[in-house]
Amino acid sequence: WTKGWGLCVFIHILFLLFLFCFLIQQVTGHLDDCTCDVETIDAFNNYKLFPRLNELLESDYFRYYKVNLKKPCPFWNDNSHCGIRDCAVKPCPSAEVPDGIRSGSYKYSEEANNLDEECEEAKRLGAVDGSLSKETQQAVLRWTWHDDSSDSFCEADDISSPDAEYVDLLLNPERYTGYKGPDAWKIWNSIYEENCFKPQNVKRPLASGRGDAHFFSGVCVEKRAFYKLISGLHASINIHLSARYLLQDTWSEKKWGPNITEFQQRFDEVLTRGEGPRRLKNLYFLYLIELRALSKVLPFFERPAFQLYTGNKSHDAEMKNLLLEILHLAKSFPLHFDENSFFAGNKKEAAKLKEEFRIHFKNISKIMDCVGCFKCRLWGKLQTQGLGTALKILFSESLIEKLPESGPSYGFQLTRQEIVALFNAFGRISTSVRELENFRNILQNMR
């Protein structure tokens, strides 16, 4: 019996060593379709960018997100909602939201808010021609055109709807809620099978034991990228759920923390039949895409007219300086993803593919309204809008380069919703990369 017990212990130790080696060795090195490697991203994110980004996301401008969690699912009739209390979202009383945000939640500066108020007052009085200057009318028309333009990659909420409410993201963190099973599977299955480019003969769950080169044989770079983005987003969400798992739930205390077993079930090479390492590499691919978007959008935020407007001028100025520091840091990254290979072929075919790309992603953003867990729905909507905003930036480079130093930016615009979603979505990806290091350390200490 003693010999048998000793053999079991030895086998268990070998298994843990294997898991540690998987995390340290398999998810390293070069990323497909990129010039970057995992180690460079880890060092840059975990010790340079992550601490600054966390500080920014705790500020008032970025912590309040307006969202409509009551929109019906547009794809199937399903009124079932998660009954677990951790699925609930606590909206903010209006009085708790800073005045500057409430007064003009979809514009980004004091000047824009004042202009919007002028427009609304003119509409109310029925005196558009007499109350608005010609320049103001043109600006409002172009903003309206922009908000409805084909550059949008997401189905955005109507934040003027009575059902749209402010949510404090710090008080409603993304973590494990217990939402799983057929309902959750249906969401991801719809995303992968109906709205995600991938080899037609591959069904979810994906077959194992094949490298990316074989897996994506015959699939163009744009469609490969689309699939990797969605897979990377899925991986990031699973890391958050594993890192903030409900470990203890008693009448006196709730304890959240990393669940190594949950993490292994989602990413271990053996348990996932070879799929785990690919999922994690796709997370790093997503990181590079969103980081590239931040580096490209710097001129938009550098303009003197732009403010992170909450009504607190000194704090707003401080946060803008921190924002610019983060964007300059993003620009300094040495091995950025090169998006110039996207849609670079025949112009007619490229335009058709780009539109197909946009429609697929827009459908995925709509699917978020089918998620039965409200907290999962909140973070799903925010992260898809954030990724959609990143794609919009990457496909608007020529417009960003033509931005005037002062005055309205007619060609390229971001709403406050898009700005908040962009940075919080990247904050989630940055957190996932940081949590991977934490899981590596836990496994190392278990040796």
Image (cartoon, grey):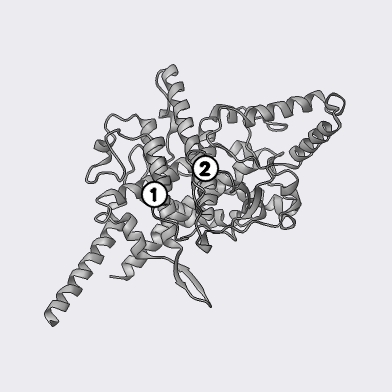
Judge whether residue 43 can be spotted in this image.
no
The residue shown at (73%, 48%) is 102
116 relative position to 152: left or right: right
> Which quadrant, please, contains the N terminus?
bottom left
Q: Secondary structure at mark 2?
A: loop
Q: Are marks 2 and 1 in contact (CB under 8 Å)?
A: no
Amino acid type of the residue tagged 1 in the rendering: Trp
Residue 86: horizontal and vertical position, in percent? 52, 62
Q: Kindly identify which numbered label has been placed on residue 100.
A: none
Say which label, 2 or 1, has the lower sequence index: 2
Give the left or right position of residue 269, taking residue 302 as reference.
left
Instruction: State the image coordinates of residue 169 (x, y, percent, origin top left).
Output: 59, 56
Q: What residue do we see at 47% from left, 44% from top? A: 333
Q: Which quadrant of the structure image shows residue 196?
A: top left
Q: Residue at x 28, y 53 (%)?
A: 272
Q: CA distance from mark 2 to mark 1?
A: 15 Å
Q: Residue 345 at x, y = what percent?
A: 39, 21
Q: How many marks?
A: 2
Q: Is residue 253 above or below residue 331?
A: below
Q: Closer to the camera: disc 2 or disc 1?
A: 2
Check disc 2 and report the residue beneath it: 73
Disc 1 marks which residue?
A: 185
Out of 186 and 256, give the one closest to the viewer: 186
* Kind of residue at badge 2: Cys
For label 1, the crowd category at 10 Å Cα-Cα, with few meaning under 14, some 14 to 19 and many 20 or more, is: few
